[in-house]
Image: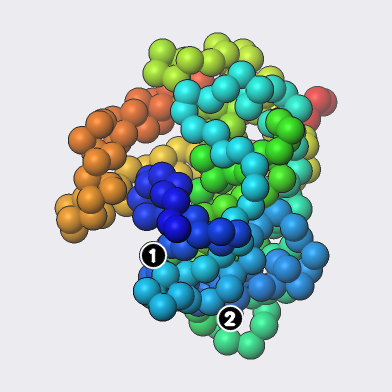
Amino acid sequence: MEEPLGERVNQVVRIGATVRRLTGPWTPAVHALLAHLADRGFTGAPRAHGIDTEGREVLDHLPGEVPDYPLPGWARADGVLEDVARLLRAFHDATAGFLERPGRGGGPDGARGSGLTWYFPPRAPAEVVCHGDVAPYNCVFRDGRPVAFIDFDTAHPGPRVWDVAYAAYRFVPLSDPRQLAGEPVGGQARRLRLFADAYGLDPAGREALIDTALARLDHLVRHMREQAAAGHPGFTRHLERGDDRFYLADADYLTRHRETFGDALRPPA
């Protein structure tokens, strides 16, 4: 029997110990990545088990809790924030070597991974394979701790900070408190530092993080609008409820407080 697991953009159902999802041109790349992660001993991602008779991909169902907005209080704890950063670092490190395998490189501009079809084009420098949408709704928790990421559809090669900045935006969170109830800017800056420290982000990544978060929000809004214009029902619903305006307001908030966040990320003199 099929059990619907909710629908953000893709339709997802559970059948026993598996999850079934619609596929796309990027699915072979995602399945190859998940196999690589399993080979590397990374347990924070599902395994793929091919395609079912209805043309849907078959993935492990990972037991646990996947929170959504408004987030429960436990999901906003400092320890959770730091654990997510460590899990993201472990994921990125586990992708090492994947892009060097035959047929997965060859980008003349340094955007390795051009030998595969990804949901989003590879971004240079392709240091790792980015998840592409690290957020509470794509993170499995057990006993209040993050244990795995799910929904790898948007995975693509890119710089570490491309993932780190968006994960920080979602988990700190770096939203305007008038839009998404949370700490004022001083508390957000403190939590942003915790996230960067727990990940082990290098100085160049810290310097680029806020500008990268702004680029991610711009990329997200443009993608939503393009997909809605093309008739995608999920993204059409997002625009109808004003998600694009929400992200643009957050971009304005980040711009206004760029100096505060930048100062928090700099190591002490």
Camera-side residue of 161 and 53 = 53
Q: Which residue is mark 2?
A: 104
Q: Earlier in the sequence, mark 1 or mark 2?
A: 1
- Looking at the image, which residue sits at the far front? 1
Q: Is residue 27 left or right of residue 233?
A: right
Quadrant in the rendering for residue 202: top right
- The image quadrant where one finds the C terminus is top right
Identity of the residue drawn at 63% across and 27% down? 75
Camera-side residue of 153 and 14 = 14
Can you say whether 257 is above or below 133 in the image? above
| Kind of residue at disc 1 | Leu
Identity of the residue drawn at 51% across and 82% down? 115
Q: Which residue is mark 1?
A: 22
Can residue 219 be seen from the camera position used here? no
Quadrant in the rendering for residue 194: top right
Query: Residues under labels 1 and 2: Cα distance?
Result: 23 Å
